Amino acid sequence: MKPYEAPSLLFHPHAETIWPALFRKVPLIPYQRERISTPDDDFLDLDWLRQGSNKLVIVSHGLEGNTSRAYIKGMAKHFFENGYDVLAWNYRGCSGEMNRQLRFYHSGATDDLSWVINHAAPNYESIYLIGFSLGGNLTLKYMGEGNTNNKIKKAIVFSVPLELHTSCLQILKPSNWMYHYRFLKGLKAKVVEKAKHRSDLNVSHLDRIKTLIEFDNHFTAPIHGFADAIDYYKKCSSLYFLSGIQIPTLIVNAKNDPFLSKDCYPDLLTGSAVKLEIPARGGHVGFAQFHQNGLYWSELKAFDFLHHD
């Protein structure tokens, strides 16, 4: 299909990133919510669009996102209207109700993604994975760990921080302060909410945490069994799992994505199942189009890659 061309109105990477997040509206029939239990006595909230198809698309959202975000609804709408069932899932603590266990979601929590896939798989012949940003990292890491469900046929991911440490340093740059502030504010709010129900979560030092790396050092890493933030980034960066992916997979990272470090544009081996496409424009989870029946380029790209042999 044609390469992405950004609308002239979106003349800057930040405009390409912010405009869709703030102003895009996607009309979509209501999801059917299903709550499933996890092996550790917690829960995940799954949002379905079903029409009796034998093909399922599973969509994973980004950091501090959920299934109500326009980029998730736009993708779900396009595939549903083209004959697929769709499952958009909310990570722990992201569905509007705080999860029960001490653990949260994080960039490497493939056990939850695997649980969701295996829960849905018995009712389908073919499964396709789509991930955005953190959800893209999660998808790639799952695919590269070697425990992939045999019904998965293809995967496509967008705007993926393949190397978490250098991408975290990227988002700490002054030009990205608005994103950093928003993410950190949301994560802190989740910690405060969880602490109301968990006496084993100490938030007395929360006000002293000023960066995402400090948050990961104090909360994400110790809660989820990592030595520190650097250990967490090293063990969960999907860049180090790409060589294990055996199923056709496409990574789409815009060259002007303000969130991504240079490590997020790797040279891939010839013959690898993983391909990397680098549009010149697109921002982070952007790829907006005007006058295309409400469709974004990312939705057309995903359908083109996943639907066609």
Image (tube, rainbow, N blue to C red):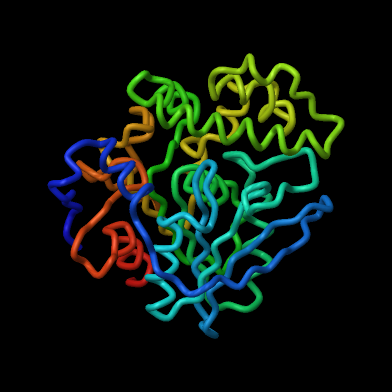
> Quadrant of the rendered structure where residue 105 is?
top right
Quadrant, the N terminus: bottom left
Residue 68: image x %, image y %? Answer: 51, 58
Q: Residue at x 49, y 25 (%)?
A: 165
Q: Nearer the viewer, residue 181 or 237?
A: 181
Q: Decide: is 265 above or below 290.
A: above
Q: Residue at x 58, y 77 (%)?
A: 124
Residue 29: image x %, image y %? Answer: 48, 75
Q: Would you say 227 lies left or right of 197 here?
A: left
Q: Decide: is 155 above or below 293.
A: above
Q: Would you say 104 lies left or right of 255 here?
A: right
Residue 236: image x %, image y %? Answer: 58, 35
Q: Decide: is 78 above or below 242.
A: below
Would you say residue 244 is visible in this rendering? Answer: no
Q: Residue at x 49, y 46 (%)?
A: 62
Q: Would you say 71 lies left or right of 66 here?
A: left
Q: Decide: is 210 above or below 91.
A: above
